[in-house]
Image (cartoon, grey):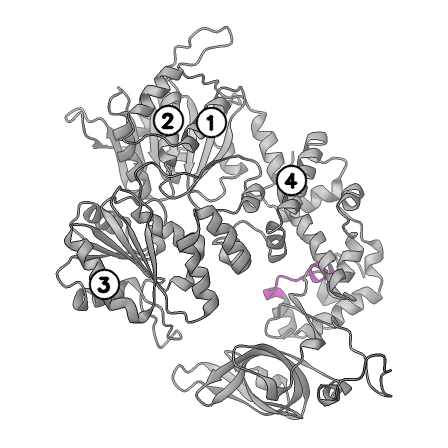
Amino acid sequence: MELHDKLETKFRLDENQKKALRRLNLFSVADLLFHFPIRYSDISEVKKISDLTPGDTATVYGKVSKLKMKKAFRSGIPMAEGEVADLSGKIKITWFNQAYLAKMLHDGESVKLTGKVTQSKNGIYLANPEFEKMMDMPVDMHESLFRPPRLSGTPPSQGERKYEGFSYPVYAETKGITSKWFYHAIEKIFKEKTLDNVADYIPSDILSAYHLPTLKTALVWMHKPKNGKDAESARKRFAFEEVFCIQLERQHDKLEYRKNKSFQIKPNENDVQDFLKRFPFEPTNSQKKSIGTILEDMAKTFPMSRLLEGDVGSGKTAVAATAAYVTVEERPKDKNGKMQNFGNLQVGYMAPTEILATQHFESFIQYFKHLPINIGLITGSGCRKFPSKLNPSGWTTISRAQLLKWTANGEIPILIGTHALIQKSVRFKNLGLVVIDEQHRFGTAQRSKLVRKDNIAPHLLSMTATPIPRTLALTIYGDLDLSLLDEMPAGRKQIITEIITPNKRPETYEKIKLELAAGRQLYVICPRINEPDPEKEMALNVKSAVAEAKILKQTVFKEYEIGVLHSQMSKDKKEKVMADFSAGKIHILCATSVVEVGVNVPNATVIIIEGAERFGLAQLHQLRGRVIRSTHQAYCYIFAEAKSAKTVERLKALKTAKNGFELAELDLTLRGSGGLGGTKQWGITDIGMEAIKNIKMVEAARTEAVRLIQQDPELTKYPLLKQKVHQKAGEFHFE
């Protein structure tokens, strides 16, 4: 059996199994080998049914009976139910949306079930348990659950079986395929000695340096570990491998981009200081440090690639504006040191949404209105230019064709917009700096669009307010140098944050009314847009923005104007709502997390976050940051329905953590990779996210990737590794 063999040619598969394997994206023997167990069923965790308590995730052994298919009384959801019994008692079992399972098991069969023990008004039941038929049941295991423990040193009685702690791997399953099928399929692969021909793509010196098992050993230990130590060692190897491959891609990107030349921008220090004095606040030390580092980068002959991470309200835009000022003021010299006559350099500033692009356009007008500089705005909704000929202190709407013409001939030095900025129709005369604000990975393909035919590339400054743990930033942004803004401008007061339980809602609303009466404004953030359709969805106890706006208007804030903002609204409606909220025509804005990024209304000083337990800590922190835009005292009320002590404890961290980065680290620890929004978009698997928790592992992978790329940029000496990187990172293009 070879790794490239198709599964359907090596295994007898019925139609349901073929469909199931396709759903799991498993097509070849290699795919199957890399479909790792999600956990291992530890026999020592088996419980008597009589010992089960609500909230436990438990494994039981017993015989099933009373299996049947039915539909839920209210929701009509198809389901299967039955009972499982051991010598101590019996418990009901229920599978929601999996009615077919009632036909896969038969009354009287012996099974192993693992599921959550759930309380209902009729007693407890096992909810959606994973199951495995046990051909050798009733097992001595069954008896051993009820037999008094043997004295230490006493040999097993005749017929008593000794069970290993890691006997049964449990895999991600789908309809038609069970863990048992995977177990026997892997057994067949191993028996045919398929792994004898497996070559390792990780260099042997790296494996030795970090005490990692070979590929063959790691695959065996992943599927059939003898003990916990072997399983952990195998997972460590694959975790390192994943981060290592991502780092190789990122370091290659960095090397390729630095092969281009860029404009050397050497600012006049006095001019920079004069520009900084125009801000309505004294720059923080971290802002000054970041500006200094960015200006050093821009003075080099190769293009800057830097990520500026800054907490909400820490002043990233001011840093970007300073870099933009230095760029447009610079008149580049030719190779002989003479001033070139093609005019100043240009800046492209890209924002993720029209709302944010428009906001930056208005901010830049304030930063640059004292200078004879044209500023343009390009979005899907239209184009604007500052200053207007008729109104030198304001902007005017212009045609797209006119804006593109002025950008191409250099008359517009600063152009702000959405992703429209990197479309083919937008041509700059001398693009010196690109600022990417809150964009997801701006990868190689996008960057290549910015490089001119003469191989001159602009300096690149990426910015994010999303708090990212340092290990994750070092991995996904491995091709960028990092700068951190970890201070707030002077005069900003700490947001008063309170966790509000349902019984404290009325008094909290009264406190908020006092703020509204004083002229302040309120955000109300809800997890979903609309109420669920009871005919199509299970009714969840989750507030929706549209319904909450109506309820608040009818019951709590009758005298105030309430608006709604969410992602399904048209661009024009969104802009109208935000304009009215900014102007104070709307006092309360009910929204989804669409306001998470960049929305800036200084007069909005109070925020309610409904269903807070459904958000990660880092996201809650970003939402809270909407009300830290002024020197007024700000308030954040976390409305949580969760009764779990663990959830309440997690939310309390919002009151004690110093900044968003600390919260992101805590989220990674408490919730794992699921606590970090968007881990899927970064292409990191659950095993890879385990590595992200380990700073030493990430730094080791980064160190080795830097070394290899410096020695062999195209990995010509490591063809198998090059192939693996291609496979893991679709964006990684070696020439």
Residue 702: assigned label = 4
Q: CA distance from mark 1 to mark 3?
A: 45 Å
Residue 519: assigned label = none
Residue 191 appears in the picture as rendered: yes
- Label 3: few (<14), some (14–19) or many (≥20) C-alpha neighbours in 10 Å: some
Look at 52% across and 81% down and name the residue there.
54
Q: Which residue is mark 1?
A: 294
Q: Which residue is mark 3?
A: 509
Look at 37% across and 66% down and name the residue there.
640
* Residue kind at label 1, given as amino acid type: Ile
- Specify which label sits upstream in the sequence, 2 or 3: 2
- Expressed as whole percent of the image width and height from the top left, the position of residue 166 reads 74, 70
Q: Is residue 110 above or below residue 551?
A: below
Q: CA distance from mark 4 to mark 3?
A: 50 Å
Residue 322: assigned label = 2
* Residue kind at label 4, given as amino acid type: Arg
Q: Helix, strand or loop at disc 3?
A: helix
